[in-house]
Image (cartoon, rainbow, N blue to C red):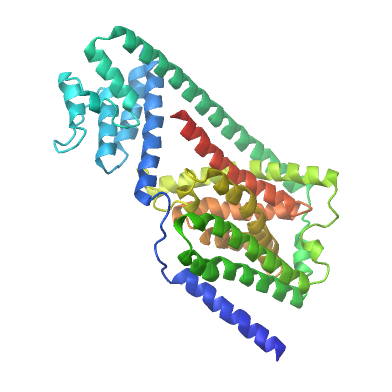
Amino acid sequence: MGFSLRGLAFFMMSLAIVAALVLPGKEESRPVSHSELQEKAERTFFIFFMYQLLAVEQAPAQEREALKGQLQTALRAQSFTGAAASAERFVLLRELGQEADIEGSSPYVSLKNLYDHGTLLPVKDISFSLAVEPLIRRKQLQHSGDAGALRSLEEELQRKATRFMAVITILSGSFFLACGLAFFIIIWARRSLSMRFLPVARSMIAGERQAALESVLIFFFFMFPLGRVLALMAEDGERLPLSLAISLAGALMAFLHFREHTSGTFRFFADVPLSAGLFLREVSAGILGFLAIVPPGLILLFFTLLASGKQGVDTGGAHPIAFELGERFWLSFTLAVVVAPLVEELVFRTWIHSLLAGVMRLRWALILGGLFFASLHPQTILAWSYLAFLGAGLALVREYSRTLLAPVITHALANGMALGIYLVVTSLE
């Protein structure tokens, strides 16, 4: 009777999880709306493009026209909406020496007069809060004849363009170096390391499999049905801390349930007791895992976006944490770099991966686990290629490491890299 009640309870829990995932919920109110995030993403694009234009202006004369042609092609290929984006695009095309127009009803129509007729902007219009505002000020000074102010501005823009190119060069060089390291790490791991977690997964008895499945259900019940209900009752500013608390509470309850219904629970998280030396080795394994997984994953994402034919900047499928970065960066950082890696590696790389690897060939366990990992993330399906690759790669890191710490480190570095790029981009402005 007890088993029947337990089974019924988890069956009802499963139905609640499915309902929470399938049924549409109330639109959440966030500190930053979709339109505001879209504008911010487009602004970042135009800042990058402006610095590329400034860098091209410093290129040798024989290369300059070809580089400008490439920039023009890239800019015309993008699709933007809104008066501000149209004005940014107008300024950049005119700086490239190309024809462009602004609608007469646009609040930025005075820019057309500046570029077409040399009509100086009114004082209130000199700064439109556009990303290309430095180019507008330069054009204004060129027509006003203030040589001293123009020279000072151009020196400042040259310094910023040089810094921009240095940052891009470092990031590009680091990425290609990481791609090369990824190749050698993968070859070395396949030849020198043996699977460590697979024997544990395949030695699970029926009771342990049931406990693992139930632990997964407990965690997802906290995250989806319960999490959605609590989010509806919370104030806007409380939702991110609430998400952090629900993740930790769900993982803790799931872990306690798993420990209660398994013997030798520790073997699922480490095959030997953790020591200082093992800790350093596992951290190193996590770093190597990051270098082996993330660069190829980003290449896969690039080709996925290329194959989709999608153009322009679209934040419609952005992760919810992107809406919180401006006002609550460090709380977002804690959730993305500390809590999410710990919780998701516990759930996906310990319980879900062990359930899959115990009943099917490893390659299918990696594929299905990666797809399941991707499907539960809120990004659009275009990001699934990277997320599924990341999920499968993290499972492999767990297979080749001695503890759960290594994939946690890999996961934390992958999430931290995204936030680091955000900081670099915002600092360029």
197 left or right of 237 in image: right
Residue 23, picture quadrant = bottom left
Q: Tell me which residue sits at (39%, 46%) in the image.
A: 37
Residue 187, picture quadrant = top right
255 left or right of 156 in image: right
- Residue situated in front as seen by the camera: 223 or 177: 223
Residue 419 visible in the snapshot: yes
Residue 181, picture quadrant = top right
- 360 is higher (above) or lower (below) than 402: below
Residue 393 in picture, x, y percent from top left = 64, 52
Residue 352 in picture, x, y percent from top left = 65, 65
Q: Tell me which residue sits at (66%, 63%) in the image.
A: 251
Q: How many marks?
A: 0
Q: Tell me which residue sits at (64%, 64%) in the image.
A: 249
Q: Tell me which residue sits at (32%, 27%) in the image.
A: 133
227 left or right of 26 in image: right
Residue 41 in picture, x, y percent from top left = 40, 41
Identify the image quadrant of the C terminus. top left
- 263 is higher (above) or lower (below) than 64: below
Residue 59 visible in the snapshot: no
State the residue lying farthest toward the top: 148
Identify the image quadrant of the N terminus. bottom right
3 left or right of 278 in image: left
- Residue situated in front as seen by the camera: 147 or 191: 147
Residue 351 in picture, x, y percent from top left = 69, 65
